[in-house]
Every structure is written in C-alpha cells, then in structure tokens.
Image (cartoon, rainbow, N blue to C red):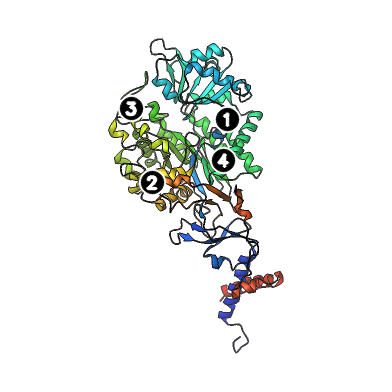
C-alpha cells in the first residue's frame, strides 16, 4: 500500500495474476505427465506434459514439473509414451467403408464362372439393402478387362440369377459388375452409347453389354440397390458407427468423407450421429457432383445440404468433382496416350465433365463450396488447376486436388502459386514395385517412374496432405508414415518431422479448422493419439510396428484398449509453489480471488 493507502500497480497485477492462475486450475480436469509429446508447434515442438480442462481444451503445455503444480481432478503418467495430435484423414469413404464391410466379399481376382458361388456362402444369399438386390464388393474390374478369355460377367450372372438384380462393386470404387436384371432396372439395356460421366463396356463385335460398367455408370446401379429408405438409412447409420470405431482405433480424430453420395442415405447417417451426440470425429465432408444430372437442378440439392458452421463438428462444405477416372482402368486423363485403350474409348483417357468443368467449378465455388477435385492423370491435374486459376471468386479456398498419380512437371509450381493443396495417398500398395511394373505396360517406363510426385511437389512449395482413400486402400496413418520415408530412387521424405504435419496440421489448414486442432497448443482441442513406440526413434522400416494405444477427442477417451487412462497416479501430489498453494485453498477464497481479479482488470483497463 502506498502513502495514500492505495494498492500499488505491482501488487494489483500480482493479485490478478494469482487469481487468474486459480481460475485456470479450478477448471482443469486432467493432466497428462511424463510423456514424449510432439506438438507440431514449430515454436515449441516438444513437451512432457499437458493440462486439459472440463471442456476438452488444452490449457497448458510444458514440463512435467510445471504441470504437476496444478490442482487437477485426475493425473495420468504417460510413462514416456509418444503423444501426437490426432491424425486427420482428408480423403476417405467412411460410410461407404462401413457398408462395404457388410457386403458379400468377392475376391479381387475371382474367376467370372465362380461369382455365383460366392453369394451362396454369404448370409441371405448376398441380398442387401431391402430392395431385393444381391450386392457384393471386392472384385477388380481391371483384371476382368485384361482377361478376355473368360465369359462375360453378365452371361454367368444371368444364368444364376435371371430375374434378381445382382451388383458387384469394384475394389477401387471406379467400376462394377452387374447382371441383365440390374442393367434393365436403370435402363442400360436400351441406352445407346454411354451415360454421362460413365462407360458401358460392350462386346466390340456385337455391341452387347458385357456386364462391366466404369466410372459414374455405376452410380445409378448403386442408387437403385441402396435408395435412402428408412431401412437403408438405419443400415447406413449402423455402418457409420462401425466405421467411427475403426477410425478411433487408428488414432483418427478428423476426416473428410469424400463419398458424398447423398442419393444413398450417406448424409442422413452423418446428421444422425451428430444429433445423437455420438460423433467421435471432426468431419468436413464432401457432396458428390453427379455428371448425369443437370447442374442447375443439382445445385438446389447441393445447396440444401450445404453446411459450414465453424463451431459444428459436422460440415458439408466441399464439392467432390471428378475430373477423370483412374490409370489402371485407362480412364485417367493424360497428355500423352496410353499404350492400350478401352474399346471405343479415347487413348488419352476419360473426363467426367469435359468442357463443362469450368462452369461446374465456378458455380459451386460461388455457392460457397471448397472444391475437391479427383484427378489421377496429368491432364486431369492440369484441367483442375486451370479451373481454379480462372475462378472469379476464390473466397472458399484452399481448394485441393486429390490422388495425383501423374502431374506434369510444368504444373508442380502452380500448386504453391495458386494456394492449392496437393492430397496424396501413399499406401504400400501404391508404391509397390509390382504396381510400377504393371503401370509400365499402360503408360511406359518414364511416366511409371514419375508416379505420385509427393516429394517433388513438397520441394516445389506445395502444401501437402496424406490421406488414405479408405476403404480403397489401407487406413493406417502409421503405415503411410513409413511408406513416404522408405520410397526408393531418392523419393523419400527426409525424416519423421517432415511427415507428421502432412497428417495433422496441414489437413487442418485444408479443412479450415487449424485454429481448433491439428497441433498440441494452448486453446486448441485435446484431440490426441498415443503410440506404444516412439516412431522418431525407430528404424524407418520398423515404423509400422508402432500401435495406437489411446485416442482422445475433445478431451474424451474414444479408444483405450490397454486402460492407460486407468493408470491414474494414486496420490496426486499437492501443489508446492506459492501460487499453486494459494489456489489449493477452499473454493470460497478462490471464488473471491476470481471475482477480485475481474474487478481489478476492469479498473486497469480504465487507467
């Protein structure tokens, strides 16, 4: 107190600081201590402990000794385990993966003659979706196209199922096999040529249907087999719940469901899990843009489903635009021709929208959507970059190109220049030498050696993300980390530190919530994953042996098979620092200190 009996400014600030410290400690429910925490915060990349409040927010990150001074409800010893921000998967098919897991599984390399026998061994003979359709999944349509010695699928399936519609979905999501009843159900038995955005494979001599359909030609068949009835909405909901459990097991706390097939009850399933409070990821999802529907009519449907509340866990704020198909089916759009070609198809590949792509992109961007382009060929990538560059309004950026199996070298720097995110899927299968050898037969040795130029775009300054494309490929983020660190021919990323952001903060930037998640920092959500091994210390070819043993979302445990959160320190030590000791007193003193601090701060604001 000074000569006039007034508190000095120094003492006022000291009291206010102590009171504010008490406010922080009074709301802290959980301390995680004694860990190896990689924060993905460049200013402070490593920490030992963190403090989480009752709202699931991180309120302190630092040393174990400092965190242990706080008065908390629970304290857990991490025992030097590695903690990372929750993984973020910016391109996968969540509802679809859950549904496919329930379908009758058909081996990728199944012989056509054996297809009916697979259904005989499945529950209900393979019937699924309450519409009287028999549905399977898993076959590789590319193998069927390559092997011309077998009977056509439509012939074999029609003999076994002359009146029951049968649909078998391709393992990569770009084709399907169907019998005559299924083809007739969507009018393919009378159509001339191909439907918009799709291909019907026909006999090159008789022009008869073979039962193989590619690209968007499968969607009307899917719609007919799985319309959004009440029963199918329940199936989609249950499938999503199963998929959410799998995501938690893999440490994934943020997704972008890239399916977006709103004609098949997928958006309703997401809305229900959010409404019922069982959503265990942050989801910024896409809506599929159907090339077989008029844009004006479809725009009304898309905008009615659009949502972009930044404070909501669930948003539908991306437009999924397929530019081309995939290289293995000769439908990825290329600048130079394939070595082979599909019957009656362009040797340079296939485009869903052709010249209409620019108008589609402009219209959807103006409607508020982020643009989510599917591209696999170099011409497809160039077309998408051109469309973004010509947008009159880029307010919904960043946009992204996903897959990117081939990118022309002249386009590498355009990603950074245009602020476009490059989203890769680098699972073991995509970089396997057998896949490269297979692709040499389709696109030649030079282009096959340039597949998936992730490091090249990274070095060119592009913002990169790594996603899974699950269930077309493996889900595990840990497997992807190892893959990008072990690519041959000098194309590996330099170290683990360079890869972790591609699965955490970079997707958070893409999905426009990096202010809330993506790194372990104060005032961000406690979305965390704990591994049983420190991947920074493992040999790169042993990283895949690390396992997720704890996943937290917004401070809540959503996966803990080993009961780590039950390893609570029995006797939480009482705080010993001066400020902490003061805060450890009874609640009345803390309340008065907090009230006093607010008054003091208001008074200081008027000085």
Q: Nearer the viewer, mark 1 or mark 4?
A: 4
Q: Nearer the viewer, mark 3 or mark 1?
A: 3
Q: Earlier in the sequence, mark 3 or mark 4?
A: 4
| Residue 567, position as x, y percentages in the image | 62, 56
Residue matched to label 2: 485
Residue 259 colored magenta?
yes
Q: Secondary structure at mark 3?
A: helix
Q: Earlier in the sequence, mark 2 or mark 3?
A: 3
Q: Secondary structure at mark 4?
A: helix
Figure disc tally? 4
Q: Tell whether label 4 touches label 1 (CB within 8 Å).
A: no
Q: Which residues are magenta?
A: 257-263
Q: Secondary structure at mark 1?
A: helix
Residue matched to label 4: 246
Q: Which residue is at 64% across, 24% downward?
A: 130
Quadrant the N terminus occupies = bottom right
When asked about the image quadrant of residue 267, the answer is top right
Q: Earlier in the sequence, mark 2 or mark 4?
A: 4
| Residue 92 drawn above or below residue 173 | below
Cα distance in 3D space between marks 1 and 2? 38 Å
Cα distance in 3D space between marks 3 and 4? 35 Å
The mark found on residue 161 in the picture is: none
Q: How many C-alpha atoms fall within 10 Å of the one at disc 3: few (<14), some, or many (≥20)?
A: some
In this rendering, does residue 394 appear at all? no
Q: Earlier in the sequence, mark 1 or mark 4?
A: 4
In this rendering, does residue 128 appear at all? yes
| Residue 312, position as x, y percentages in the image | 58, 48
């Amino acid at each position: 107190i000074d000569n006039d009996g007034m508190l000095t400014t120094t003492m006022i600030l000291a009291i206010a600081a102590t009171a504010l410290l008490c406010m922080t400690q009074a709301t802290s429910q959980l301390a995680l201590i004694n860990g190896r925490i990689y924060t993905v915060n460049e200013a402070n990349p490593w920490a030992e402990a963190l403090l989480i409040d009752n709202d699931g927010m991180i309120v302190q990150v630092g040393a174990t000794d400092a965190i242990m001074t706080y008065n908390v409800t629970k304290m857990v010893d991490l025992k030097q385990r590695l903690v990372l921000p929750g993984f973020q998967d910016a391109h996968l098919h969540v509802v679809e993966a859950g549904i496919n897991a329930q379908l009758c599984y058909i081996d990728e390399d199944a012989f056509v003659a054996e297809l009916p026998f697979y259904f005989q061994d499945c529950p209900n003979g393979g019937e699924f979706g309450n519409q009287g359709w028999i549905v399977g999944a898993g076959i590789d349509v590319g193998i069927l196209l390559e092997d011309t010695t077998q009977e056509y699928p439509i012939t074999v399936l029609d003999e076994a199922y002359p009146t029951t519609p049968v649909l078998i979905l391709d393992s990569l999501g770009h084709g399907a096999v169907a019998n005559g009843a299924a083809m007739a159900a969507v009018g393919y038995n009378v159509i001339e040529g191909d439907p918009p955005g799709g291909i019907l494979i026909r006999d090159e001599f008789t022009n008869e249907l073979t039962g193989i359909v590619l690209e968007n030609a499968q969607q009307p068949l899917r719609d007919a087999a799985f319309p959004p009835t009440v029963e199918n909405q329940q199936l989609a909901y249950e499938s999503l719940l199963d998929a959410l459990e799998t995501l938690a097991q893999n440490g994934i706390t943020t997704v972008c469901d890239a399916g977006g097939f709103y004609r098949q009850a997928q958006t309703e399933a997401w809305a229900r899990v959010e409404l019922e409070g069982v959503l265990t990821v942050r989801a910024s999802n896409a809506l599929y843009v159907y090339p077989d529907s008029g844009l004006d009519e479809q725009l009304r449907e898309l905008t009615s489903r659009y949502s972009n509340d930044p404070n909501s866990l669930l948003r539908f704020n991306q437009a999924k635009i397929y530019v081309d198909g995939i290289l293995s089916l000769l439908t990825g759009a290329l600048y130079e021709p394939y070595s082979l070609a599909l019957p009656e198809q362009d040797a340079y590949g296939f485009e869903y929208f052709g010249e209409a792509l620019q108008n589609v992109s402009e219209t959807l961007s103006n409607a508020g959507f982020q643009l989510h382009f599917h591209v696999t060929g170099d011409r497809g990538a160039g077309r998408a970059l051109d469309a973004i560059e010509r947008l009159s309004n880029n307010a919904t950026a960043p946009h992204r190109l996903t897959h990117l199996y081939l990118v022309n070298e002249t386009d590498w720097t355009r990603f950074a220049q245009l602020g476009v995110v490059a989203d890769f899927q680098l699972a073991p299968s995509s970089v396997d030498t057998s896949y490269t050898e297979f692709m040499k037969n389709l696109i030649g040795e030079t282009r096959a050696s340039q597949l998936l130029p992730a490091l090249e775009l990274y070095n060119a300054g592009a913002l990169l993300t790594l996603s899974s494309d699950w269930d077309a490929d493996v889900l595990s983020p840990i497997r992807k980390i190892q893959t990008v660190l072990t690519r041959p021919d000098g194309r590996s990323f330099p170290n683990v530190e360079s890869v972790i952001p591609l699965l955490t903060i970079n997707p958070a930037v893409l999905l426009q919530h990096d202010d809330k998640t993506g790194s372990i920092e104060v005032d961000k959500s406690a979305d965390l994953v704990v591994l049983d091994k420190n991947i920074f210390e493992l040999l790169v070819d042993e990283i895949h042996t690390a396992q997720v043993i704890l996943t937290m979302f917004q401070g809540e445990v959503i996966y803990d098979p080993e009961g780590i959160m039950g390893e609570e320190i029995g006797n939480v030590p009482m705080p010993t620092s001066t400020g902490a000791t003061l805060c450890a007193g009874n609640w009345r003193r803390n309340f008065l200190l907090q009230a006093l601090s607010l008054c003091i701060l208001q008074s200081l604001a008027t000085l």
